[in-house]
Each structure stands twice: as C-alpha cells, then as structure tokens.
Amino acid sequence: MFGTQKNIFTKKKKSVQYFVNFSNSKVDEYYLDTLLNEIKPFHQKIEITFQECKFKSEAIKKFGDILMSLKNINYLQLIIKKYVLEGLEDIQELALVLEKLQIQDMNLVLQQSYLRQQGFTMLLQIFSSNQFLKDLSLDLSVNSLGTVGCSLICQEIKNFENVETLSLNLGSNTIKQSGAIDLGRVLAKLKSLRILNLNVSCNSIGQDGSRLMLNEILKNNTLQSLNLSLQQNFLYDMGAKQIGVEFIISKLQKVQIELMNNDLSHDGVNKLLIQLNFSNDLFYVSLNLCDNLIKNNSINQIFKQLSQLKRIKFLELFFNVERNTDAQQFSEFGRALKQCQYLIALKITFCDLKFSWNPKENNFILRNLRKAKRMICCYAYS
C-alpha cells in the first residue's frame, strides 16, 4: 500500500568506513602511527573510541594532525569514556582539534568522563563556531552535572544556530526540574532545529518538570520530529496525561517517547493516547511502556483504545507481558487490535521469552489482523 515505507520503523544507521578502539592502554606514538597507517584519505566516515586510556596533549595534537589529513571526512564519531582527559590543557587541545574539522555530521560521546564543568564548557564552545555542522550528537550522560552544570551547558547550546539535527543525552546527571526547564527554553530558541533526540532519563525531573520542559520545547515552530526519553522520572499516570496535553497544539509530525519505569497504569497510557490523537499534524507515534504497572488485562484495554485513534496513522508500542501469558490471552490481544481500522501501520513488541520461542504457536495476533486490509503488521520479539 505504501511501498518502500514498509520499513518506517527501521532506524537508519551510519555507514562507518573505519573503526578503531583504544581501551585500557596508553595512547602513545606507536598507537597513533598505527592509526595513521590504517586510515586512508578516501575514508569519509570514521569512528574512534578511547576508553580508560591515558591521553596527553602531545598525543592529542598528533591525533588532530591525522584527522586534518583526511580531506573527505564528513562524519566523525569520537567516544571518550572514563578519565581519558585528565586536565584542562588536554581538553583545550582536543577542542582545538575538533574546531579545525569543518564537517557537517559529528557524534561526540563523553560518557562518564568526569571532565568537570569547565571541561564541558570548553568542548561545547567549539560547536557554536562551526558553520558547517548540521547534524550533532552529544552524549554527556553519567557525569554528575547537576543543575549548575546543566545551566552552563545550556549557555553553550543556545549558540548551535546552524544545527538541524541534535541528539543530546543528559541521562543520569541529576539535572532535576529546574535544569530540565532551562534546557527546554534553550532548545526552543534553535531556529534551524528540525529533529531533536533528547535523553533526560534518570534525572528526578518529576511530573511538573517534564511538562514544563516539553511546553518550552514545543514552542520551537521549526521542530518536526521529537524523540524524548523520560525513563525513570517519577511521572505516574498524571504525568503521562500532562505530557499528552502539551502535544495537542504542537506542529510535530513524529513523536517517540520512552516512558519506562514511571509506574504508569493503563489509565495513564490511554489518557496519553487520547491527548496525542487531538494533534492535527501528528501522524507517527512510538511509545516504550516497558517496566511499568501494565498487566495483561490492562494491555487489552489499551488496545481497545487504539480503535479510537483517527489521526495517528503509524503507531509503535513496546510492552512487557506476564510470563504466564497463554495462547488465549494473545488471541484476545489480536481481537482487540483487529478493531484498529484507522491505523495504516502498527508495530507491537512484546518483551516475553515464551512468545519469542514459540511464534508459530502463539501468533494469534497476526491471524486476527489479516482482515484489516489497511494495516501493515510488523512484529519484533525480544
């Protein structure tokens, strides 16, 4: 029915041409000479990982010379984990290296790197001056930033004026409600931003913090797609409903929300879906609802609610099912889903080992959906 769009749920991956991993070692002249010999001038997409390495400023400078020798590079993924950079001098040297690379697509991972606030600020400043950068991915998770550190990072993010696609991971940084709201205000002012992937999981943001942050983000009229991870932020059912209300007047076309570990019941999920369905422009919705308070009977009630969705056309849901789920219960799931006549594409992922090992015996869902001619069914079992 819609041809090549059958793969709408498949995330596009970067085609990396060269990959190298330095781990638990000292990055010295020998390692960098090896790197120089292996990277070729025609390599355009490169991924380099430094994990638990000793990386001094002299080595960083040579590393920069190697990258500068690649005239055709257009994508760089640089992963730095656990105490790779020890002092501000080392960080400044790395910042100078990245600033010279005039590329459009960069993924910088500084997960659990403990750079301190000055270090993060120094590295983020380089992106505001890069006029070529359009696609930027920053992983700053697990760095104990706190609300003060988040505020400093926001001061730099506001200068990402040319970035069209931003992936920002601030998970497990205790930014709390005030940090989340500050972040939302800054993201709302990025006028070139089209696609936002934001991870603020495990930050004790709460219901009001999540709602107010989202309210600010949705003030960005150029934003078309939002992937928001709110895992383990104490939302509960009221928080889910409040999130849905914020989307009613938004102009977004595509929304993906991670809501794992927020003590949601079927009531909160249904209220969220009802609010999302009021949005005039929204047609693609993905919800990860695993590890909440949703039991098998609750799943049936959620599926019945899906039959009322008239505006949303593409829907993806992730659930946990109980370990004792039998064929009859899966058949009930299927009968409920059969009523979803307005959906064009539907993907349901059940996280259940028994169902995974016996797809032929238990796949009553598919049998009950064969008559739904407008629906394309795509299943993944984990």
Image (spheres, helix red, strand yellow):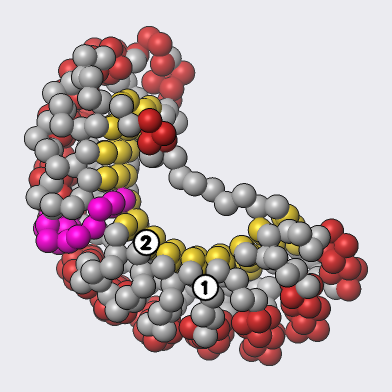
In reply to whether residue 246 is colored magenta, the answer given is yes
Please state the horizontal and vertical placement of residue 340, each as a whole percent of the image. Answer: 16, 28
Q: Which mark is residue 133?
A: 1
Left or right: residue 245 compared with residue 85: left
Residues at marks 1 and 2 touching, judged by CB atoms closer than 8 Å: no
Query: What type is the residue that disc 2 sits on?
Result: Ile
**Relative to the observer, which residue lies in front, 77 or 116?**
77
Q: Quadrant of the N terminus?
A: top left
- Occupied quadrant, residue 326: top left
- Residue at 24% x, 32% y is 344
Relative to 374, residue 111 above or below? below
- Residue at 37% x, 82% y is 158
Q: Which mark is residue 299?
A: none
Please state the horizontal and vertical placement of residue 39, each as a whole percent of the image. Answer: 80, 61
Left or right: residue 275 compared with residue 337: left
Callout 1: SS: loop
**Relative to the observer, which residue lies in front, 53 or 313?**
313
Please state the horizontal and vertical placement of residue 290, each as a whole percent of the image. Answer: 32, 41
Looking at this view, name the residue that lies furthest to the top.
361
Q: Earlier in the sequence, mark 1 or mark 2?
A: 1
Callout 2: SS: strand
**Residues at marks 1 and 2, CA–CA distance in whole angstroms:** 14 Å
Left or right: residue 328 compared with residue 10: left
Which stretch is magenta? 240-256
- Residue at 85% x, 73% y is 28
The residue under label 2 is 195
Relative to 119, residue 250 above or below? above
In reply to whether residue 322 is colored magenta, the answer given is no
Q: Residues within 10 Å of mark 1 (few under 14, many from 20)?
A: many
